Each structure stands twice: as structure tokens, then as C-alpha cells.
Amino acid sequence: MSLQERLVSGDVRALARLMTYAENNDPEATRVIKGLYDKTGGAYVIGITGPPGAGKSTLTGKLTKALRDCGKTIGIIAVDPTSPFTGGAILGDRIRMQDLFTDPGVFIRSMGTRGHLGGLSRATQTAVRLLDIFGKDYIFIETVGVGQSEVDIVKTADTVVMVMMPGLGDDIQAIKAGIMEIGDVFAINKADLDGADRTKIEIEMMLDLNENKEWRPPISKVVAVDNFGIDDLLEKIQSHRDYLQSSGELASRRLRNTKQELVSLVSDRVMEFILKKSDKGFTVDDLVERIVSKDMDIYTAADEILSRIKE
Amino acid sequence: MADKDNQDVISKAKRDWEEQRLEKLLSKRPERKDNFVTGSNAEVQRLYTPNDVEGLDYLEDLGFPGEYPYTRGVQPTMYRGRLWTMRQYAGFATAEESNKRYKYLLEQGQTGLSVAFDLPTQIGYDSDHPLSEGEVGKVGVAIDSLKDMEILFGGIPLDKVSTSMTINAPAAVLLAMYIAVAEKQGVTPDKLNGTIQNDILKEYIARGTYIFPTQPSMRLITDIFEYCAKQVPKWNTISISGYHIREAGSTASQEVAFTLADGIAYVQAAINAGLEVDEFAPRLSFFFNSHNDLLEEVAKFRAARRLWARIMKDRFNAKNPKSMMLRFHTQTGGSTLTAQQPDNNVVRVAVQTLAAVLGGTQSLHTNSRDEALALPSEESVRIALRTQQIVAYESGVAETVDPLAGSYYVEAMTDRIEKEASEYIAKIDELGGAPRAIDKGFIQKEIQDSAYRYQMEVESGERVVVGVNKFQIKEETPKGLLKVDPRVGEMQKAKLGELRKSRNNVKVSEALEGLKKAAGGDENLMPFILDAVREYATLGEVCGVLREVFGEYKQSVVL
Amino acid sequence: MDKPIRVLVAKPGLDGHDRGAKVIARAFRDAGMEVIYTGLRQTPEQIVATAIQEDVEVVAMSILSGAHNHLFPKVVSMLKEKGADDMLVVGGGVIPDDDIPALKEAGVAEIFTPGTPTSQAIQFIKQNIKR
């Protein structure tokens, strides 16, 4: 059986192997997806983001468990940072989902960012698509969670859950800028700790500044380890989904995301093309050297590269 | 120690010595290394003088043995009065086999028992639980019910021995079984002597045999404190353990810091549960590791004693001197043993024994030379015990109290360790106490960083481990290792099957139902657990009921 | 950087001594590998499911309790059952020399006993991965 057939028939090994191909930039992954593209779009994609230590993995595990109890199948992609120095990574998000390992309705994949910025890895979107084709009802994407530039998730997920916890203090200030745009639903995890109410007020105050938006992100208090508030959070995610559908926002969001993905795919390929191209006796590195040695200015060099693409 | 004028004189003389003698020599013959460090990576100077301990106030900081702050020891006469308890941790396979080993050790002159349980027992699973497969009787004795406990202590009068049990998450259940065995021997609980480890926080940090989440675990612990204060007054209700923290790779200062931070959490929990500090604190005991850096280890034990005394007095306002005394058991460092040239371990253990004794330990377990390979054989255990006896009777170090006091180096190091540990404790306070710091992975991360640094030092050859990265030889496969009979699992299963048929199952269910109800409320659980084990409810059944009510702990890993 | 080796570092059985597992996990990371670490008390079923979903090239297990003779071969045979015999399985811990031949016979590629430098394990993996 081909990988494509095995994927459609529900072979977990095939799904996993295709994800490896996607991560390794092996065209086999996209080749398979090309043949099955009409099968995409069925899954609902939920992004889980927030600062480190907020309990994203535990929460993802509990949400998964609750959805499994309703008979839904789940895919989880958990992204952790790759060390820029060694290229290695410790992928430890699974630890908090141990009871899901042997559930045949759950597929968990850990990924290193492998140099990609923006909170996800470059293969994340492809992996989502593979899980989608595989037939998962819901797909969770857990971002790296460094709290700063986790903007990619918006381009990939239908609903973004921003996980916070009490006592973050200055951290809240630090991620404040991005929060307004990113979070569709807020979850205050570890809400049994002191300061949960204050955190809620702080989030409300920030949301007040953006009153003119059609959708006001709701806030859910949860204690993921105790399974408290999970149903409430799921309901809020569902109501966001309902809003997206009824307002037509889902379609326009997916349209926007598709456009962005297409543009970035093309730009990736162009970059690859440029970096590889070495005809006419010089490479990008040569240009760089000439710029540094003041033999050429950086703008002329850029023009030079573009004119070569146009050829 | 020195007054100001004297200090200046010494400083000047030292400068002269450096300029006139030292520099000349160094230019001709440089030292072996650029940096000298302790086993825990702390900087070591070339020479220590009175000026390195200039802040030391003899009466404030050292005092006299048996008096605050107990730096020099918890008893006035120390080993001149009575030697430390030589207590070898043992237990494997079935209760029958372990009972034989205990009787052998008692015949060999050992003065206390120390029970090792297998992993299923430590995690509250019966031998026939699916997760127990392959583990039954492996690292200790398998105890499923009171029946096994009766066999384990058969022919050993429990009013005559002191028994230490390395049991944590299900400590209440094993203690209840011990009390029940004693009842059958006609020994009342007030006559019982011994220790349960009962230290769940270090399980979360380093050892890994936890069952319940933090809150209910702390409740079980304070229930034991309260119950024993009234019913089993001579029992050491907890052994707050740095041993495993050190085994996990911590430094000496971290061992002191994290152990005492755990201690603070237990004391606070008991106070919050309504107990008077002087009611339970005298029964707290500690458990430390002893590694190869002899003098640093001695300093560590002294620093731990002084710091704990100060914490109990200043932070908790203890009034009873016994509440301020840090009494401790020591085990030599398992992670220092090498699988290569295992006989060398005998020498390592001897050095570590010296450290423990010079540091004023109350009891000691010496590891056997073959423990990096397998469970120790009888012969190896005997050599380990003899090592203690040689130090006790032949080395002379037991003849006076705290013989290394006043050494500039040892006192400077005692100060340093106390200071470093205090800084960690302040940091942990800031994070909200030990349980929160564990939840955040802070303590684990600090330990892992030390462990990784150590490993890399060994691999780079910066740190020499004899026989491992230097002085290697070609070796034969060692012979005579102890093998646990693989049929132990089957034997335990069969015993369990019989037990479940022969006991009064109606009474078992009633007792378990009672326990379940109590666990949901806030009564002391000890009497309910006792009722259940007396009816031969199994360990797995008792813990199973508690698992249902309490849930299970989820490990916090930060790598 | 393009194609790091993916390794599962697993602690099967009940023993909680994870110093070795954590040290080796870090060493693997520093050698440029992607390390999936799953925590304590993993059953063979959990290890195998994880290995397959993560599509790792190496399954590295650590046991100090003496349960290796039971658990290592079980993982190997379950991987085979699932058609994942292209994964390299290695083990570490307090494992008597006498037990090693049988473990290798059962399909464990290598056993690393106490004192083995992490660099040696890394080298073994780099030389022996099957794909």
C-alpha cells in the first residue's frame, strides 16, 4: 500500500512518517497532501498559547479528555523550542498527557521549532493538514509559549485560547501588546491560587480598550490539574466557533490564512531558490562579501538579486 | 576567632609569605591545576588562616555539644556515650527471605533494622497489579498485607529492636501494619521504636515513588504526626531526606537547602493543621548522604545542624531544645559507587563513613561494594558493616566530640554551606515554599543542572573518578552477584489469591468503606487505616481507596 | 540542522531514579538530537505508542530497579508487532553483565551500564540508526 492509501485507511505509522517527511522538508509529504487536498478542512483547529508555566500542556490534555468523552477524535501538535546553538531540542509537553498515550483516538506529535520563529515550526501547518486528512475532529496546536512573538498561531488556528495564570505580574504587561489580537478565548489556569480575580480584572481592563470589536473574548477560570472549569472553557470555545460560523468570519479567516500561507510558501521557495542559485559566477554569499567590503551597496545588491529572479 | 590587631598581623604575614616564598616556588613549580574545587564544585583556597573565620563567634556559632545551635553535635558526649546505630538497609524478594537476612544482620552485631520495600509496595500496588509485573521483590521486600508483615518480623521482638522503614507515599499503611504486628506480639504502640521515611516532597523532587497529590499527601503526614504524638510517642514520624536529592545530582549546599526547605514545609503544614510545634518537632529526624569529599561533607553536616536549630528557634519559635536538634541518619553515597573495579568502593565507603562520623551522625548505613551492579551479596554487606565497626573501634575518631571543629578550613566551609543554603531557602520562600517551588520545577532544575555539570566534568576528565575515567583496567565480569528469584512475583500472587479467599471479606469492605468516608472528610485517617489492615485489607486496596478520593500526583518536569 | 535524529528517552517500570535519563536527554539534545521525554512509570504500551506517533529513530530506555529482563524485551517485541522494527532500541541502568547477552538476543541493540560516558551512547546511536 502506498503512504497515501495507508494514511486514508487510518494507519498511524503512515501519519507519523509523513509528519517526519514534512519536518525534514521531504517533498513526499506535500505530494501525498496534493492528492488528498479535497479531504482537508473538516477538522476544527484550536491554538493553545500563553506564557511558560501557565499549564498549556495539562490544559490541552484535559480538553482532549473531555472531547474524547463526547466521542471526538483528536490530534495534538506540541511545539517546543530548538536550541539555536546545537539544533537539538527537548520535547517534553507529552509528560502532562500521559493518560492519552494509548488512546487510539488521540495522536500526539512533538515538534521542535528548528529555527523557525513565530511560535510554531515550519512543518506545523503541513502536520495539521495531515491530521485533518487522517480524519481528526479537533486539532490542538500548543505553541512554544515564550510569550512574545507567538503570532503564527493566529494564521493556523480557528480559535486561539490564551492561557494565563495568576501572579504573572510583569509578564502580563510584557505580553499585553500581542494579547488583544491573539486571544479569542482566555483561560485563567491555576485559578485556585491567590490573585486569580485580579488577573481576570486585568484581562477585562485590557479587553475594554478594544470594545469596538464584534467578538469580545470571554474569560474562563480553570484548574486544569483538578479538571475544574474544563467544560466551561469548552463551551466558550464552542461559542466562538458558533460566532465564527454565523458571522461569516470563519470563511474570511480561512481565506485570509490561506492567502498568508500561500504567500509565505512562495516566499520560502523563492528564498530557497535565491540562496541556492550560483550561476553567472556569483552567489548570495559573494554579494554579501562585496557589500561588506564596500565594493557594492546593499540596495544595489538587492536589485541585482531581484533582476536575476525576473530572468 | 581573632581580634582586629591580630588579624592585621596575620594578613601582613600572609602577604609576606606569598611574596617571598610562594611566588618564587610557583614560578618554578606551578600547582597541579588552575582551580581547585570541592566535590560540589565550590572553590577551595590554597590555605586557610584564622582570617577566613574572622566572623566566627565561638559561643554563638559553635557552642557546646548538646546545646544550641548544636553545631558540635546533638548530645553532650556523642560517641563517648554510645556509638551511632549501625543500620544496614536491607530487604528483597519475599518476607521470608528478608526475615532471614534481618536475623543474620542482628547476629552480626547490627543494632537496628532498616527495611527496603519493593517498588510496587512503595507505590501502593499489590503484587498482582499489572504495573507490578517484573518489579515484585526486586529492590526490596514485597508487602501486600499484614500477613507478609507478620512473616517479615517473625521471631524479632518489636519492643527490643528499632526499625527504620523506607516508605513514603503509603507510610501510614505500613506503620499501621507494624503497629498491628506488634499488637499480635503483645507489644503496645508506646514501646515501639523506629522511623518511617514519610517524606513525600523529596519523592516529588528526586526519588519518584509518589502516589497522591501534594495536599492530601501533606494531610496524611500531619495525621501521622498527630496520631504518633499520642499513641506511638517514641516513633520518628518522618525522616526528612536529602539523601535522594544528593543522589539525583545536587551539590552539598543544595542537599542541605532543599532538605531543610522541605522540613520547613512539614513544620508549617503541621502548625496549620493545629499542632503545637513542640508537640511534634522533637520527633522529626533527617537523612543525609555522605560523599567522598571528606571535609566538605563534615562541614555540611555541621552546617545543617546549625541552620536547622536557627530556623526552628527564629522562624517557628520552638521552645523545647529537642525541637531544634537536627538528628540524622546517614547513608554513604550510592551514586559514588562504580561498576568498574568494584572493590575500590570499599575504600570510598570508608572515607564516606569517616565523614558521617566526624559529622556527628546518629545512625549509618554503609553501601556495599557491588551495588552499582546488583543488590548486595551477603559477603559485601558484611564488609560494609565491618567498615563501620573499624571506624568505630579502631580509627580513634569516635573518642572525642566533633574533632574537626576549629579547623580554619572546616569552619569556613561550614559557614559557606550554611550561607548558600540560607540563600536557597530565601529564594524558595519567595516562590511560595517548597511545594510551590517543586510544582514550578525550580528545585528539580537546580539539581539537574548540577548533575549535568558533574557528568560533563567526568567526561572531560576534569573530574577524576578512579577506575572510570582514569586508572582503568580490563576486567572480568564480576561473579557472585545476588539474583532475586524470578518466581517471587508468582509466589506473592499465589499468597494474595489465598488471602483474598481466607479473610473476612465483609469486614474488609466495611473497613475500606469507613476509610473512604473519612478520607473525604477531615478526620485523622490513622485509626481507619489500622482497622482496614487488621482485617487484612491489602496495601493495594487501602491505597486504591485513597487514590479514588485523592487522585494521583502528576510529575512536574522541567528539563 | 535539517534532519535531527529523533530519540525517545523513556523510563519504563516503577523506579523513580531519573537522574540518568535526564542527563542523557540533555546530552542528546546538546548533540543536536530532538529528544522526546515522557516522564516516569511508563508502561511498554505507552512507550510503543509514543515511539510510533513521534516516529522516532531511537528508543532509549533506562531502568534501575532490576525489571529490565521483563520490560526491555517486551517493548522490542511490541514494536515489532506494530511494524516499527526500524527503530533502534537501546537500554541503560544497573544491569548485570550476565543479563546483557539475552537482552541483545531479544533485540536490544546495546546496553549502557553505569560509568558509560554519554558521548559513547551518542556515537553508538549515530553509527547504528537504521534510517
Image (tube, coloured by chain):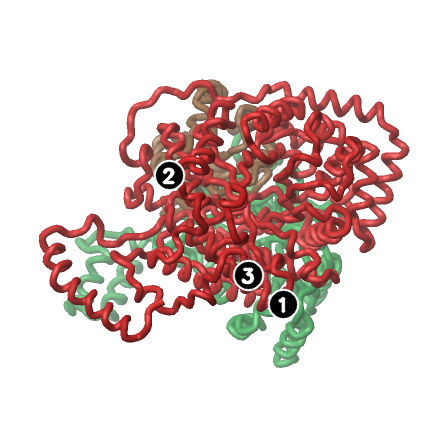
- Say the numbered circle drawn on residue B309: 3
10 Å crowding of disc 3: few (<14), some (14-19), many (20+): many
Residue that label 2 marks: C118
Q: Are marks 3 and 2 on the same chain?
A: no
Provide the letter of the chain coloured green: A
Provide the letter of the chain coloured brown: C
> What subunit carries mark 1?
B
Position of residue B485 relative to residue A287, above or below, is: above
In the rendering, at what x and y percent does residue B50 appear? 31, 64
Residue at left offset 44%, top offset 51%: B402
What amino acid is found at the position of numbered circle 2 in the picture?
Thr
Provide the letter of the chain coloured red: B
- Say the numbered circle drawn on residue B317: 1
In the rendering, at what x and y percent does residue A104 appear? 66, 38
State which mark lies toward you, 3 or 2.
3
- Say the numbered circle drawn on residue A32: none
